[in-house]
Each structure stands twice: as C-alpha cells, then as structure tokens.
Image (cartoon, grey):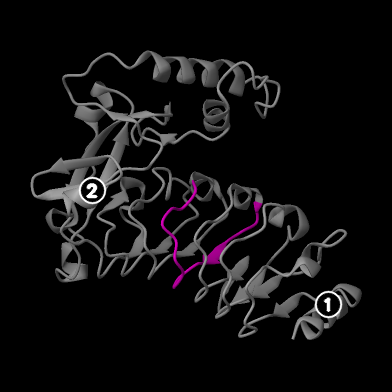
Amino acid sequence: MASEICKTISVARLEKHKNLFLNYRNLHHFPLELLKDEGLQHLERLYMKRNSLTTLPENLAQKLPNLVELLGLFSSLGWYLHSNNIVVVPEAIGSLVKLQCLDLSDNALEIVCPEIGGLRALRHLRLANNQLQFLPPDLGRSRELQYVYVDNNIQLKGLPSYLYNKVIGCNGCGIPIQLSEVRLLTFSSGQLTVFLPAEVKTIGTEKDHVLPLQELTMRSLYRTYHGLWKDLNFLSPISLPRSLLELLHCPLGHCHLCSEPMFTFVYPKIFPLRETPMAGLHQRRTSIGFVAYCCSTQCLRTFNLLC
C-alpha cells in the first residue's frame, strides 16, 4: 500500500496533477511524499477522507500552498479530511491564505486553533461530530466565511457572535456540564453555561473597569509594533516569555464591537440562541448561545447582537 501511494504521488508531481485522491487508504500518517522537495505546487484538490490520520504537518502551507476545488457553483480551495482521527490542527494552517473550504468533520478535535479564524478566504467550515468545547473568538470575523457546521459537538455551548447571521449547523450541541469534569474557564448567564477558550485566563464583569497589568502590556505592545512591522519576529524571545510572545503573534481574538485585540482577558456576554430570531430554524434541537467577546466594560454594555 505504501509503495502504491508513493507511486500515485510521484506521478501527480511529475505530471503536475491538480487533483489527488487519497481516500480510503488506511493512512495513519500524513504521506511524507507529499511534502518532499517543493511539495505539489500545482495541486488544487486533495481528498483524504476515511483514513486514520491523527495529526497534520506543520509545513503544510509551505508545501501545498494552492489547493483549489470546483464544487458545484463555488470555486474554492477544498481540503477534505473528514472521518479521520485528527486531534490537533497545526497553527501553520493559518498560512493557507487561499483556503476557502475546510472539512474536518468526524474527527477527534477538542480544540480549533485561533489561526483558523484568520483565514480570510475561508467560506465553508465543517467541524461536525468532533469533541469541541469552544470555538476561536474571531471565527466568523471574516465576511467571506458564510457556512459553519458544528453539529453534534455535544459539549459545545457557545458560538462566537461573529457567526450570527451566518449559515450555521449546530444541532445536537450542548449537554448539562458536570462541574467535576470542567478543566476550562466557564461563564454563565441565566441557565446557559459556556466553555471559554483555553487562552482566556480571567474574565471581567461590568464592575471590573481596570484591566490586569499583563493584558494592558500585551495590548500596548501589539498596538506599538504591529503597525510598524508586518510580523513580530523582531521581538527577541527574551523580551517576553515564549507563551506570551507566541500569543502576541496571534491574539486570542478581537473585540466583537470595536476590534481591539485581546490576549488573556475578556468581557464575555451571552445571547441564548433560543432568544434570537434564529431559534425557529433549529426547533429546540440545540442548547447553545452566541458569545460576544468584548475588550472593556464600555463595549460590554454597548454590544447588542440583535441590533
């Protein structure tokens, strides 16, 4: 089987194929042949459904930068990885700037990296039947993203408010939370409790007018340097702990009202789906809400999803 796959990939590279089908190959690892030399620069369609993949390579975007698929009437970058055992999506996926369609349904994902929220060309995102507890706060911030399916992530109870007015599938989401099992920070409003992203260390309320010093520092550094350089590589690792330096490259998210970058501290606000005009579309098959992530008490008080 391995030699057959290598031959298939070699032929695709030699003949500059635009389509590559690796479905049903019982793959346990991403084929290294796909990443050799310059990769497959001409590849436009990659199908890898129903294998046993658990991880994706970090240099994926470098080796396969131009994946494109024609799907119906949509011209989109298409990558189909559903029905594998993928647990983690690498941060490098954020470099796939042409990505328009990503299918990670039926895997074992517990976390979706924030970089996915920064994919400006992404139109279709399928994450159904995983083990997600939260979504990146910036997911849906791009106007291009119009279709998001997260059905049957039973512990997922919060959608970023950016996804309001998008086409979403969220049936089968939300179960009663057993507090003894909770390892993430949670936020409650009424009867709805949602998990917050792992990067959130503290949450604020309308009474908390002063931000933590660390959050103030991170926001100040980002404002000072991000406008001067397109990246933050000039900052020495000695300037900040490695974890904060990495976070400075990719903020936790941006305020859902004023777009201020946020790093470890947010002011969350929940709008239960059942109390929105979208309630009728889901016929009570889901227990979920939209979460607005705000940067200050002023934005928290002002933000209204329904206006």
Judged by depth in the image, the label closer to the viewer, 2 or 1, is: 2
Helix, strand or loop at disc 1?
Answer: helix
In the image, the segment drawn in magenta is: 96-113
Q: Mark 2 highlights which residue?
A: 194
Using the image, determine if residue 183 lies above or below residue 274: above
Q: Amino acid at mark 2?
A: Val
Rate crowding at label 2 as few (under 14), some (14 to 19) or many (20 or more) other CA atoms within 10 Å.
Answer: many
**Percent of width and height locating residue 44:** 72, 70
Q: Mark 1 highlights which residue?
A: 12
**Percent of width and height locating residue 23:** 62, 83
Along the viewing direction, whichever of 289 and 153 lies nearer the viewer = 153
Rate crowding at label 1 as few (under 14), some (14 to 19) or many (20 or more) other CA atoms within 10 Å.
Answer: some
Residue drawn 46% across the image and 53% down it: 112
**Percent of width and height locating residue 192:** 14, 50
Quarter in which the C terminus is drawn: top left
Q: Is residue 182 left or right of residue 218?
A: left
Q: Amino acid at mark 1?
A: Ala
